[in-house]
Amino acid sequence: DRWYQRRVHGELVSCCLSALSNLFFFDRPGSALGQAAVELKLLKADILGCVVDFAVQITNEEVCCEALRLLANLARHHELVRQMENLKIVEALTILLAHDNIDLVYYAVGVLINVTSANEARISPDMIEGLIKVVHDCSLSEFDLLLATVKCLANITEKHGERLKLTREQIGELEKVLTQRGDECDLVLGGSSKNPKREETPGDLPLLRRVINSVMNAIPEQTFNCPIASCGRRFKAPEELENHIKRRHPTK
């Protein structure tokens, strides 16, 4: 019947996507040379175009997860990142960050980690807000997702910090959620140092704490620039800018 065909076809698609994902897991940038490299590049571009529909549908979540795994491996090749953006894949991944299925969110974040590691990646405010919400909604018991999301934020702040145009509200929310998760790490680690059963901790909390610290240190500070073109002074608060204008440019 129709249900059986849909289930069987879904399993077949899932197996094919899984096989491709495993194959490209061992493919490293620059591993092929000459004509083979050209043919492999074209093959990956064709596969990327075919896998889009499987990655953005959510009627079969198993197929979606396998498609996202494949996209994550393809996204390690930075020449494909621009194609992913042109195909609106990155926008779709940003939307998936709000999904109720934690596995889908985890694999979507996995793709974004590789996408944001490319210097040419375009970082949207929606992506940042989606990642902040994932960190906000995660607990330490969801360690893998939390660590992956913080790593993605680390890529964004460290590689694209100078180009980011975060609002004061976004910066404040990012600092708030990271501080909360960092405090939770410190609390558990402090208790674990007195408890020999360290295996009961949810994951590598020292690693998570280090990544949180790296993001906190790389968060771009919002500045308020003097409107006088010949001045160029920057200030951390609007009150400082106002006082500067009164003192240095009273007639402007």
Image (cartoon, rainbow, N blue to C red):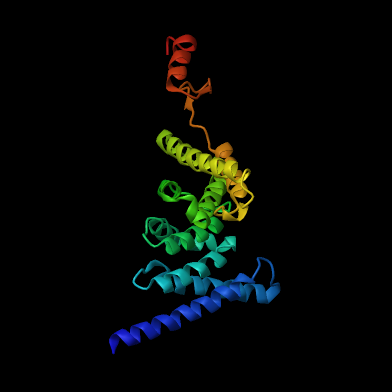
User: Where is residue 125 drawn, in percent x and y?
Assistant: 42, 46
Q: How many marks?
A: 0
From this viewpoint, is residue 87 visible?
no
Quarter of the image for the C terminus: give it.
Answer: top left
Residue that appears at 30% across and 84% down: 3
User: Where is residue 25 drawn, in percent x and y?
Assistant: 61, 70
Image height of 106 relative to 241, above or below:
below
Q: Nearer the viewer, residue 209 or 89?
A: 209
Residue that appears at 56% across and 67% down: 74
Q: Residue furthest bottom?
A: 1
Residue that appears at 46% across and 12% down: 249
From this viewpoint, is residue 22 visible?
yes
Image height of 113 relative to 53, above or below:
above
User: Where is residue 112 drawn, in percent x and y?
Assistant: 50, 57
User: Where is residue 234 drawn, in percent x and y?
Assistant: 52, 24
Residue that appears at 58% across and 51% down: 119
Quarter of the image for the N terminus: give it.
Answer: bottom left
Within the image, what quadrant is residue 31 found in? bottom right
Q: Nearer the viewer, residue 239 or 44?
A: 239
